[in-house]
Amino acid sequence: MIVIADTGPVNYLILIGEIEVLPALYHRVLIPLSVCEELKRPRTPKDVRNWITQPPAWLEIRAPSKSSDEGLAHLDTGERDAILLAEEMGADQLIIDEIRGRREAERRQLPFTGTLGVLAAGAEQGLLDLRGAVDRLRQTSFHIAQDILDRLVEGQP
């Protein structure tokens, strides 16, 4: 299975202590080099910067061979490269949170999920406590409507 992740989901999974759900679900995850660089920025939380300085064996960092695409000019570098890499590699899953990136992934018919989808899948597999993970996520800068988080935890569609 080929899984590509953007910056946001990796960042938030590290912050809430659930990053190990990625290899448990997908075995290997690829991130674009630009995502790696975003995770190292000075404004990135220290725990995230520390984590990416010694990436685990299950994380592969790779730059897409194509560096531009007019249709992706409205996205930030990490989102653009994650989509380009997903297309290039024929990814089974793109993990992306930003709405503009998700819309573009959908337009390009790339299968995608986000941080919440990863958490829900992890909980379904018995890998994590969804309520606890969502409670920790609420303590971060993750932006989503409160009722969506509440419905996820309550198990409503």
Image (tube, rainbow, N blue to C red):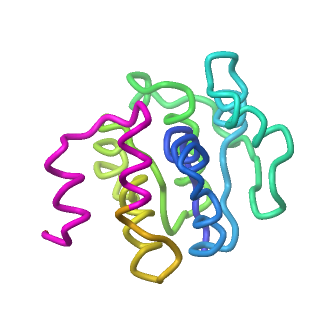
Quarter of the image for the C terminus: give it.
bottom left
- Using the image, determine if residue 111 lies above or below residue 100: below
Q: Residue at x 14, y 49 (%)?
A: 147
Give the residues drawn in magenta, as a range: 132-156
**Residue lying furthest bottom in this view?**
125
Residue 20, image x, y percentages: 65, 64
Residue 36, image x, y percentages: 71, 36
Quadrant of res 43: top right
Quarter of the image for the N terminus: give it.
bottom right
Q: Residue at x 81, y 56 (%)?
A: 56
Quadrant of res 73: top left
- Using the image, determine if residue 34 lies above or below residue 110: above
Quadrant of res 23: bottom right
- Using the image, determine if residue 25 lies above or below residue 22: below
- Magenta segment includes 139: yes
Q: Residue at x 72, y 37 (%)?
A: 33
Left or right, residue 131 beside residue 27:
left
Front one among 56 and 128: 128
